[in-house]
């Protein structure tokens, strides 16, 4: 097998993997597709919509361009929500809950290791205050 072919396969596998993560898509699947299909797979992945982190449906942007057309939630927290999240992060930690925010996806993990579904900053705040 040509060494150049292998280098291209690894290159597009990596590229597709990174983009699949950003689009909330199946990373393993797109790494394989990237290795096999190369540039073609990359272009296809670039064109398909990303998956809403809240409702797991295709994120079709609505008129204001930032909300999910299916569930109405934003694809990322705005600056006010980020400040809010930071302000009660410590209280959550005291309750044994860690919150990670990577710019798009929010991961909430309980002390037991179980993951909680993020249903909005307001319900998270209610939980802190309860
Ligand atoms: Zn949604």
Image: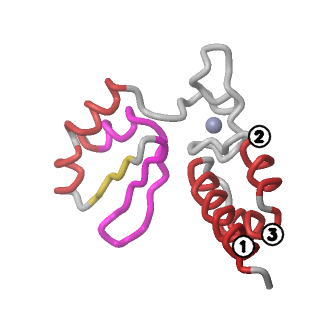
Residue 48 painted magenta? no
Position of the C terminus, as image quadrant, is top left
Task: State which region is magenta.
Answer: 104-127
Q: Outermost residue toward the bottom?
A: 1
Q: Can you identify the residue that label 1 sits on?
A: 4
Left/right placement of residue 19 relative to residue 83 reads right
The residue carrying pointer 2 sits among few (fewer than 14), some (14 to 19) or many (20 or more) residues within 10 Å by Cα, namely few
The picture quadrant for ligand 1 comes to: top right
Query: Whole-percent x and y of residue 21?
Result: 58, 55
Query: Whole-percent x and y of residue 122?
Result: 38, 32
First in sequence: mark 3 vs mark 1: 1
Give me the disc on residue 90. Answer: none
First in sequence: mark 2 vs mark 3: 3
Give me the disc on residue 36. Answer: 3
User: Within the image, what quadrant is residue 81 found in?
Assistant: top left
For the residues labelled 2 and 1, the Cα–Cα distance comes to 26 Å
Depth check: give the residue in front, 112 or 42.
Answer: 42
Q: Outermost residue toward the top?
A: 63
First in sequence: mark 2 vs mark 1: 1
Compared to residue 43, the image places residue 17 above or below, namely: below
Compared to residue 124, the image places residue 32 above or below, namely: below
Q: Determine whether the residue tagged by mark 1 lies in a helix, strand or loop.
A: helix
The residue carrying pointer 1 sits among few (fewer than 14), some (14 to 19) or many (20 or more) residues within 10 Å by Cα, namely few
**Which residue is pictured at 32% across the width and 24% down the height?**
80
For the residues labelled 3 and 1, the Cα–Cα distance comes to 14 Å
Query: Whole-percent x and y of residue 39?
Result: 77, 55
Q: Can you identify the residue that label 2 sits on?
A: 47
**Which residue is pictured at 39% across the width and 37% down the height?**
123
The residue carrying pointer 3 sits among few (fewer than 14), some (14 to 19) or many (20 or more) residues within 10 Å by Cα, namely some
Position of the N terminus, as image quadrant, is bottom right
């Amino acid at each position: 097998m040509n060494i150049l072919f292998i280098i291209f396969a690894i290159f597009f596998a990596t590229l597709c993997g990174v983009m699949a993560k950003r689009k909330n898509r199946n990373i393993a699947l797109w790494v394989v597709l990237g290795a096999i299909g190369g540039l073609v797979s990359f272009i296809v992945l670039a064109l398909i919509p990303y998956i809403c982190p809240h409702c797991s449906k295709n994120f079709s942007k609505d008129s204001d361009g930032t909300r999910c057309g299916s569930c109405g939630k934003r694809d990322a927290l705005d600056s006010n929500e980020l400040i809010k999240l930071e302000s009660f992060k410590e209280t959550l930690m005291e309750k044994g809950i860690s919150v990670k925010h990577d710019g798009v996806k929010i991961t909430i993990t309980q002390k037991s290791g179980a993951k909680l579904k993020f249903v909005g900053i307001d319900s998270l705040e209610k939980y802190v205050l309860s």
